[in-house]
Image (cartoon, rainbow, N blue to C red):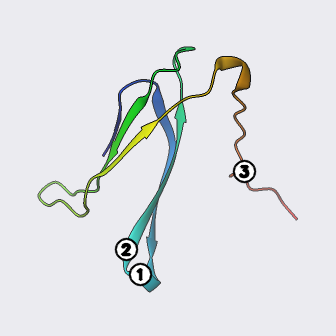
Amino acid sequence: MITVSSGSIKQVEILYVEPIKGYRILFDWYPNSDATAPVEMRLFLRTKEQTLSETWLYQYFPPAPDQRKYVDDRQMTPG
């Protein structure tokens, strides 16, 4: 489960990493305003009955709107 205090989360990927027998989670955060106030992010994994991970907490400080450059670098291209 991912929660954020503002904005929205998209492109969530959950990967199982065999060598560490753990998970890696990737996601993109998108702002819903020009605000530069800190964004509280919280993430943990669970099934319906069981929590699978510790809780990850992060405070993101968005740059000023004129300094924002969003690039989707996870696009797969042929070749």
Location of residue 54 (image quadrant): bottom left
Residue at 40%, 68% in the rendered image: 23
Location of residue 78 (image quadrant): bottom right
Residue to which mark 2 is pinned: 22
The CA distance from mark 2 to mark 3 is 24 Å
Query: Could you tell me the amino acid type at mark 2?
Result: Gly
Query: Could you tell me the amino acid type at mark 1?
Result: Ile
State which mark lies toward you, 2 or 3.
Answer: 2
From the viewer's side, name the closer residue of 40 and 70: 40
Helix, strand or loop for disc 1:
helix
Mark 3, Cα crowd under 10 Å, few <14 / some 14-19 / many 20+, is few
Mark 1, Cα crowd under 10 Å, few <14 / some 14-19 / many 20+, is few
How many labels were placed on the picture?
A: 3
Position of residue 57 measured from the top left corner of the image (x, y, whole percent): 33, 46
Q: Residue furthest bottom?
A: 19
Residue 20 is marked as 1
Compared across the picture, whether 75 is left or right of 59 comes to: right
The CA distance from mark 3 to mark 1 is 26 Å
Query: Could you tell me the amino acid type at mark 3?
Result: Gln
**Dots 1, 2 in contact, CB < 8 A:** yes
**Dots 2, 3 in contact, CB < 8 A:** no
Position of residue 50 measured from the top left corner of the image (x, y, whole percent): 14, 61
Residue to which mark 3 is pinned: 75
Compared across the picture, whether 32 is left or right of 21 comes to: right
